[in-house]
Image: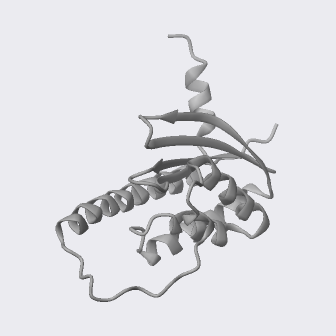
Amino acid sequence: MIQFNFKPLFIKTTLLFGILSVFAGNAHAQSKEKKATPKPTATKPAAVAPSEATIPGLSAMGITEVFFKKYKDDGTEQAIDYLFSTNKLFTDTAQISGLKKKLIALKQSVGQYLGKELIAQRNAGKNLYFYAYILRFENQPVRFTFMFYKPKNDWVLYHFKFDADLDNELEQAGKIK
């Protein structure tokens, strides 16, 4: 039986998780700073056509469904652009571009996308939801996790990460304690 060593992939995804955690923390800190700074009201921004992310009433689960449809039909870059467009605080285009590149590289190593399965769904109250999905690829599964927050009326992305360390978790869960 041939075994593949996915440890380098695990290390890369772990590093990405750290980057995204810092990114999410910075976005949260920026939101606190923006609350303290009064906004000028003299100018009115130009009208922008709403994306699917800003359609009132779109649920957190609805955002993930649109994300996966874009991921399958339009590709990684468009799906990530859509996902991060739900939260106006995610403005660091360099970090988002880095994430896209890592997901594209991952996709090249794990093969063609075959589908997804929701494996966990949790909430903390009515305004913070967590979803974990297993994405099926030709060569191995990958986990995507999303956290959404609803500060007022619309759901926004609060946290996103992906990893391929599922085998270690399942092995640990199967051990006798």
Q: Is residue 144 visible?
A: no
Whole-percent x, y for residue 14 in the image:
47, 51
Residue at 34% from the left image edge and 63% from the top image edge: 27
**Apparent side of residue 73 relative to residue 6 in the rendered image (left or right):** right
Total labels: the figure holds 0
Outermost top residue: 177
The residue sitting at 38% across, 53% down in the picture is 151
> Residue 139 location, x and y as percent?
78, 49
Q: Identify the colour scheme used.
A: one colour
Residue found at x 71% / y 64%: 70
Q: Where does residue 90 sit, x and y in percent of width and height?
A: 42, 68
Q: At 42% across and 69% down in the image, what residue appears?
A: 88
Q: Is residue 51 visible?
A: yes
In the rendered image, which quarter is residue 56 located in?
A: bottom right
Quadrant of the drawing holding the N terminus: top right
As drawn, is 22 to the left or to the right of 67?
A: left
Residue 144, horizontal then vertical, whole percent? 60, 49
Residue 164 against residue 47 in the figure, above or below: above
> Nearest the camera: 128 or 143?
128
Foreground pick, 9 / 77: 77
